[in-house]
Image: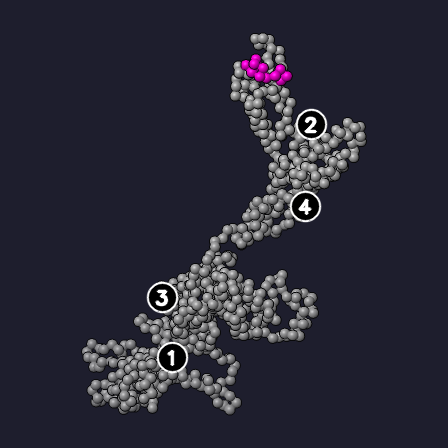
Amino acid sequence: MFKLDNQQEVPNYISVTDLSQIISIGKRGIRKLIERERISDHYLKKEHSTGRNGYRHLINPEGLPEPYRLEYIQHVQKNSQLSFESNHKGLPGWAIEKAKARLDLIHLLERALNRAKAQDKNITPVYHEVAEIYNSGHVLEETFKTIGEVSGYMLQQRWWPNYKKACQQGEDVIKALAPKYQRNKGHYSIPTWYKKRLLALLLQPSQIAPTTAAKILHANLRLKGREPPCSTKTACRWIKDYKNEHFDTWTLYREGEKALNDKVLPYIDRDWNTLTVGEILIADGHVLNFDVKHPYTGKAHRPTLICFYDGRSRMPVGLSIMPTENTDNISEALADAVKTLGKFPEAVILDNGRAFKAKHFTKSPEFYDTRLAGIYQRYGIITHFTKPYHPQSKPIEQFFNQLNERFSKLLPTYRGNSIDEQVPRLKRNEQMHARAYKKHVGDWLPTIPEVLKTLKHWTFQAYGKEDHGGLRKGETPLQVLEDGKGPGVPYKDMIDLLLRAEKKRPRRARFTIEGIEYQNRDVLTGWNKPVVVRYTRRVPEKVWVYDHSEGHRVPLCEAYACKAKHPFEQLVNEEGEIDPTIREQMKQRRRLRKRAKRANEALYNLNDDTTMPAWKLIPKDDEEEKEDITPISAYDLDSKTKTEDGGANQIDYPVDIDEVNEAVERPLFEYPYERFEHIAGKEKKEITDEDITFLKNFIQSESYTGLYKTKYSGWVNELFK
């Protein structure tokens, strides 16, 4: 009998028939080897059989000629390896390696025990002696590298008994000596119903801790008279494995979609360095983490910062601060960005906030006039709105983090980035910090202009001059911005960014913008067609009115907010004089009424009557129409007309008839600028005193400054020299 390396024994004898199926010669060839004594009789054995001679030969493979013997051994080794792999299929490789190393140590122990028994000595000290010799590292060096040091107690109480039991019962000694720990790792004997009930507690927004969920479930089971199928620690280990294998489900049900997007889902890399400066701006709002003085109430509040962030240079190029996020705030920040860049951006990535999506910015150019179209479309800027709660698409969030850490925390009115990071003075029962703040800071609050000026200084002098991880090596945000600036944008091209536009129809010289009534009695009295009103919330007391007739857009006037009087306010002061303001308004009303009456009297050829019955305009059948009614200017004539006969029917005019004839030849001026165009360029002797008065008022208006000053300034100077 001999053994192979895996300790499996090779059978002592084998029949000729079985041997012929293993080696490369048949039964007849094997019998000839026996007849020719190529196989020694020592390795042969006869066994009774029903064959020809009444017996058959059994051969010990060790007696075969060397070529056939090696062939037989290779066959046995191959089959034994397959059997070995089949027997140990359930064991991990590291466990089999340790079991083999332990078996080598057991063989060393077995020889030592046999020597002690042969010498009739006590075998108890042998276990500790073998352990000491092994731990010295002088024997079984490879085994020592695999399993390390062992104790005599381990050999005596565990490994040697397991080895003897496996040999006695005919079991595999490798399995008997293999480590038992981590053998069932990941395979829990937990029923499915228990897992489902445990997940029902865990996959909730309340985010119950795994240990707590297991204890709750076990308590409920015991109340119903059932024993939990596993311990709390086993349940926690299974929960940990479930979380690692189903992290997406775990995150979605416990933390929500935003956490799923931020922690689990893959993302797309964006190379912002492939852009040019000003090609794409990222816009977003951020509530500042420190107190600022409210511009209207004077109380402490946290204002909103609107920032336009250049994607290439990583530089905040447009900044604006207001109490709340609104369209004026955004327009001001965009205008600041255009001024800083020296050009208009090609595209803007916008937040999903209500103010960013207002029609003031996004309404299409087909909206009844390009003057009132969305600002982005008006300037040819492509807009893209980011997905809600998706910070990966907005690198501006990194700037806001830097702003909080390096700017906001340096201000004495800093409040904290969140409730957990709130400064001590705002927490309950923090009297020491509250007293210190009141002593050193008191009621002082920075104003919005002060904060904006300081923030821009920090942005360009500190943040912009430091290296940025998103830029190429050696580049700074300010350096990249300066290298890519445009030639500049004139102020007149940015006026639409600063002023909002709204279409209104005046009623009795008034119109309403955002709850405030505006009026201009001189120009808008009698005006009953739409106008375009340009305004900004920063100057609520005044708006600019433009004519919106087809074919031209002319500045008409400025309208001012109406100031109502108190119902009980005295119209007459102590001296008996009327309030000058009220007196001026009353005079203006009389002047406008008189102007309207003059136009009617001139039109219908009346003297004293202020109304004209419609039936008087219809001639009788037997009468011929004797005159041609010619309209004259409502600005120039008093109550004066003329008949053609000049006789008995002639009216006594209160003014010179030549003045009336001259006025009749003048056209009807519907707007002040039409009257100016009629007068402009004439010699001084051709201009009346009334026209001079009109010109003195008109050259002070925005219509003259914006449209006519460049062309007629020389003529006006010569006229009033």
**Residue beneath disc 3:** 368
SS category of the residue bearing label 4: helix
**Is residue 372 shown above or below 260?**
below
Q: Earlier in the sequence, mark 4 or mark 3?
A: 4
Residues shaded magenta: 31-43
Kindly report which numbered mark, 1 or 4, lies closer to the viewer in this rendering. 4
Horizontally, is 130 left or right of 603 in the view? right
**Is residue 348 shown above or below 71?**
below
- The residue drawn where x is 62% and y is 15% is 41
Say which quarter of the image contains residue 11: top right
Which amino acid, by three-letter code, is at mark 3? Tyr
**Residue beneath disc 2:** 167
Give the CA distance from mark 4 to mark 3: 68 Å
Magenta-drawn stretch contains 700: no
Which amino acid, by three-letter code, is at mark 1? Glu
Residue 245, percent from left and from top: 57, 44
Quarter of the image with the N terminus is: top right
Crowding at mark 3 (Cα within 10 Å: few <14, some 14-19, many 20+): few
Give the CA distance from mark 1 to mark 2: 113 Å
- Looking at this view, is 429 or 4 the one in front? 4
Crowding at mark 1 (Cα within 10 Å: few <14, some 14-19, many 20+): some
Give the CA distance from mark 3 to mark 1: 25 Å
Kindly report which numbered mark, 4 or 3, lies closer to the viewer in this rendering. 4
Question: Which secondary structure is most common in the magenta stretch?
Answer: helix
- Looking at this view, is 207 or 234 the one in front? 234
- Asked if one can make out residue 714 in the rendered structure from this viewpoint, the answer is yes
- The residue drawn where x is 63% and y is 74% is 441
**Residue beneath disc 1:** 702
Which amino acid, by three-letter code, is at mark 2? Cys
Residue 613, percent from left and from top: 30, 78
Q: Which mark is residue 215?
A: 4
